[in-house]
Image (tube, helix red, strand yellow):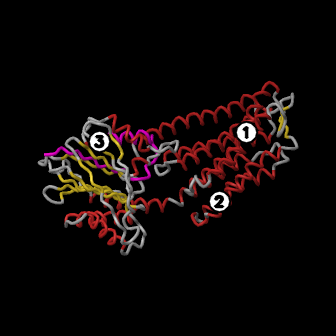
Amino acid sequence: MPKALIRKKLWIAVVGTVISLGLTIFVSQFAYHIGFENLPPISVINITLDIVGMLIAVITMIGLYLDKRKTGTTTRYLAGIIIITYIMLLTDSIEYIMDGITEYRSFNMFVTVLYYMTIPAEGVMFWHYTINYLKMQKKRLHKLNCVIEAFFLLALIIRLLNIKYPIYFYINEMGEYHRTPYYAISKVFFLAISTLTLVVIMSKRKQFRFIQLIAVFIYAIGPIAIGIITITQHYISATPIVTMIATLFMYCFLNVTQGREHAVAEHEMSIAASIQENVLPKAFPYLPDRKEFELYAVMKPAKEVGGDFYDFFMVDDNQLALVIADVSGKGIPAALFMMTSRTLIKNRMQAGGDLANIMCDINNQLCEGNIADLFITVWVAVIDLQTGHGIAINAGHENPIIRRGNGEYESVFYKHDLAIAMVPDAKFHKREFELNPGDRIFVFTDGVTEAMNLQEELFGSKRLLAVLNANKSCSPKGSIEKVYSAVESFMDGTEQFDDTTMLCVDYNGL
């Protein structure tokens, strides 16, 4: 995890802890100020349970923010569940303290409306947490999410209207809280969204362990069951504390049961990262005595290591080969497939021959015994350093970018061939190009353009070109560093899910 992200998480944890503990202390002091002897015994019990729940929420949030393995969108939704539950506990306790006190009537109305808002918010957050935990494709759920958001907005509007019209509850002139006959309807949205979430969980139950299924079912069903039991009993409010305990239970079992899996996965990823790092050339400058070119390349592995790689080598005394590739899949299988692919490409190209035929041979060899059904996108080029004449093949890879002299960087578009190892006997087509002294080629993998920020926006090719054009005077190394810095800044602490690989070459001529 980047140090900047660690500092940010620690800062959030400290500020959040101070605020939440401060509010918890405020509740206890407020109750003391009103006088415990002036409160019904059942109210004192409810307030005490709410304060205990608030402390549990604080401790859970601290654990969540200090857990280095918990990052990304799923963690933010889990944090959202805990924060909303904390607000539910806070407002419930204040409501009990102020109940029946005339001078606090208006504030009690505000607090009670806020409490009622937490109920649908809890359901929506649970839904989003689940679909992110299961890594379901949001495009397929777009219409359903729109419907859920529409009903969520309607639920909030009805609760706001309750300030003027007693739909679910009212507070009389004496400051006393009372439920209306329509109170049960306030639970319908949460019941519907929880049921929908459980249906999704059951459809994907193979992704859960038995204890994890129990945890999510307790979270969804527990508060509903308590709510139904106490629906006619205003002075018994166990829903907030039950929700907090269920949240803690869900967090612990989803987190703890994944511990061993994470440990094994991290060990495998470290091996894959080691394979990736050790097979790539890292001695720069490459062939410093050759003044015809200058190049630089970098590969930054993601947490879930993929199979990105770059390569550069002399085919003969006058021809420079450039390769950048991206293997499908993650972990050790992708790393081993990457190592095999890189070796085949280099050995076959240095043996000589027509580039299209070379790629056909490599494709057929990688198709043999490809049980894991992996494939590899590749951009490969051979440049004659005497003339600047080049031949390239693009097998399903990102479009290369070229800068002519001191001009603008531009993407080069042409029809791609199939990725390697997808289909035996696939044909590959050569593309010829000419380089003049001062021209530059910049190639990359999709880890650059598909880097995502907190708003789930992609970095994209437009931003990439903008960064390159804003730093045209940089060396190949400087250009790559500028792009990588821009990508990191754009991500703003979001977890890197794909390798980031770039190769930049200046052609200087003879």
Observer-nearest of 307 and 173 = 307
The secondary element bearing badge 3 is classed as strand
Please provide percent x and percent y for residue 35: 76, 30
At 56% from the left edge and 55% from the top edge, which residue is drawn? 137
Crowd band around label 2 with a 10 angstrom C-alpha radius: few (<14), some (14–19), many (20+)? some
- How far apart are the two marked residues, 1 and 2, measured between alpha carbons? 25 Å
State which tag comes first along the sequence, 1 or 2.
Answer: 1
Please provide percent x and percent y for residue 30: 70, 30
The secondary element bearing badge 1 is classed as helix
- Name the side, left or right, on which 263 lies relative to 401: right
State which tag comes first along the sequence, 3 or 1.
Answer: 1
At 31% from the left edge and 43% from the top edge, which residue is drawn? 480
User: What amino acid is found at the position of numbered circle 2 in the picture?
Assistant: Val
Stretch in magenta:
481-510
Q: Tell which residue pokes out farthest to the bottom in this image.
A: 369
Mark identifier at residue 403 = 3
Crowd band around label 1 with a 10 angstrom C-alpha radius: few (<14), some (14–19), many (20+)? some
Q: Is residue 63 magenta?
A: no
Observer-nearest of 459 and 430 = 430
Tag 1 residue: 156
Tag 2 residue: 200
Mark 3 touches mark 1? (CB < 8 Å): no
Q: Tell me where residue 23 sits by quadrant.
A: top right
